[in-house]
Every structure is written in C-alpha cells, then in structure tokens.
Amino acid sequence: MKRAIVIGASSGIGREVARLLISEGWTVGVAARREAMLQDLGAAATACIDVTAEEATRRLRQLIADVGGMDLFFYASGIGHQNRQLREDIELSTMQTNGLGFTRMIGEAYRYFAERQEQDGSKEWGHIAAITSIAGTKGLGPAPAYSATKAMQNVYLQALEQQAYQRGLRIRFTDIRPGFVDTALLKGDFHYPMMLRPENVAREIVSAINAHNHIRVIDWRYRLLTAFWRRIPRCLWRRFKL
C-alpha cells in the first residue's frame, strides 16, 4: 500500500495532485490551513496545518500516524506576490512561508524518513517532492522575495539530496518547477504569459514522481525559457524588462 502526505491540498495544484494520487490507489493524507476545504477529496485523513506555526511539525507527525506511515511527501504550500514597491509586509510574509515554512516541513519529512531507516531498520524508500518554481532561475525584480525563496528551495532540496546520499539514506527527491499556473496565487490585474492549467501541471507532476525525476520544469516552453534565462549575463539581465 503506497502512502502519501500532501501539504497544501485545499486548492490549486496541491488539490489536483491529491486527487490524482487517490485515483491511482494511494492512501493519502491531506493538510492545509483551511481544513474544511479538504473534506470532499476522499482522503484517508485530513489535518489543519499552518506551515508557519511551530506546531506544524507535530501536526504533520500526527497526520502520518493517522495514515499509517508515509512513502511520499508532496509539498505544495507557498505564497507569491508581485512587489514592485518592495512593501515590507509582503517581503517578510513571503520569506516566512516560502523560507521558514518550507524548511520546517521539508526538514521534518526528511527526519521522518531518516529515523524510519536508521532507527527502525526499514529498507523502504522515501520520496520528497516539492513545488518550487522557475522563478528561482534568476532574480525577478517584480517579485524579489518570491524569486529569492524559490532559489533557496531549489538549493535546499539539492543539499538534502547530497546529504541523504552521503548518509546512505533511501530518500528520493523531486524538485518541481512550474511556470505560471492559473491558480489563485496569480489572480490580479497583471496578465501572465503562457499560463498553465492546474490539471495539466498535476498530471506532469505525478508523472515526474512516478519516474523518480530529480528536477522537472513544467512545461516544455518553460524548459526553453529558463535555459535561455540562464545564459543571460548579469550586466544584461538587470536591463531585462519584466
């Protein structure tokens, strides 16, 4: 029996991924700040988890116990705002959720898998998959804290993957980097190009998880775009209009 925990399943991509995993026969526990929005998913267990709260790790462990264990940890929580005026409250709340919240929850999933193997002698593999973003490719002037935290998430997952290998832990990692997705996160007056549908993104995410991909940029257009971005020197990037 495959068991998964999905954090951030109340809406958007996280909700669609939870639906797909359940349809594939996974036993799924779901969590979000708005627990009432999880009731119609048909999950094995639900929990109210705010990733910015210190009690979030304890609640995660309880959810894992309610499901009967965890083989896949899928993390979809996050916030993002354009902040061209560099408002302090937007920058700090983005850092709190995408930085501290991400580190708190990914770290706890990692510790769970490490303990299961080192203390209990389990031979099973654990899998940590998380939605980051193509925004971590370059520093984006319209959303400084958002792009900075996404770059941090990319590097943090890479660092944990290296640490797990050095420790001999059976933990896989999948860094999911979507382009602009048509969810509540991007609602507003600004028109984003090449918008992706959450259902299509979710299908590609589950495909990446099943294939044990290390990194998946979604979709092919954004793979080309980010490859181009990486080649732009700093002296030209600062002149680039976004």
Image (cartoon, rainbow, N blue to C red):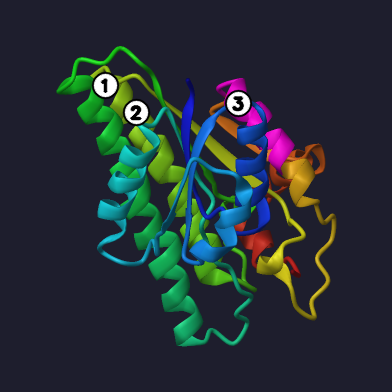
Position of 122 with respect to 4 (left or right) is left
Q: Residue at x 31, y 58 (%)?
A: 56
Characterize the local packing of mark 1: few (<14), some (14-19) or many (20 or more) Cα atoms within 10 angstroms.
Answer: few
Whether 204 is among the magenta residues is: yes
Q: Residue at x 49, y 23 (%)?
A: 2
Residue nearest the viewer, comparing 25 with 60: 25
Numbered disc 3: secondary structure: loop
From the viewer's perspective, tell me whether residue 169 is left or right of residue 87. left
Residue 232's disc number: none
Residue stretch rendered in magenta on the structure: 202-212
Q: First in sequence: mark 2 or mark 3?
A: 3
Which tag, 1 or 3, sits closer to the chain's start? 3
> Quadrant location of residue 111?
top left
Q: What residue do we see at 63% from left, 82% from top?
A: 84
Image coordinates for residue 54, horizontal then vertical, percent: 25, 64
Amino acid type at circle 2 is Gln
- Magenta-colored stretch includes residue 85: no
Q: CA distance from mark 1 to mark 3?
A: 33 Å
Camera-nearest residue between 173 and 83: 173
Q: Give the numbered dot on residue 162.
A: 2
Q: Residues within 10 Å of mark 2 (few under 14, many from 20)?
A: few
Pick the residue in front: 143 or 52: 52
| Residue bearing the label numbered 1 | 166
Q: In the image, 16: left or right of 1?
A: right
- In the image, residue 226 lies at what x, y percent? 70, 45
| Residue 208 in the image: above or below residue 64 | above
Verify CB contact (< 8 Å) between mark 1 and mark 2: yes
- Label 2 secondary element: helix
Residue 21: where, in percent of width, then height? 61, 34
| Helix, strand or loop status at disc 1 | helix
Q: Mark 3 — residue?
A: 25
Location of residue 11 (image quadrant): bottom right
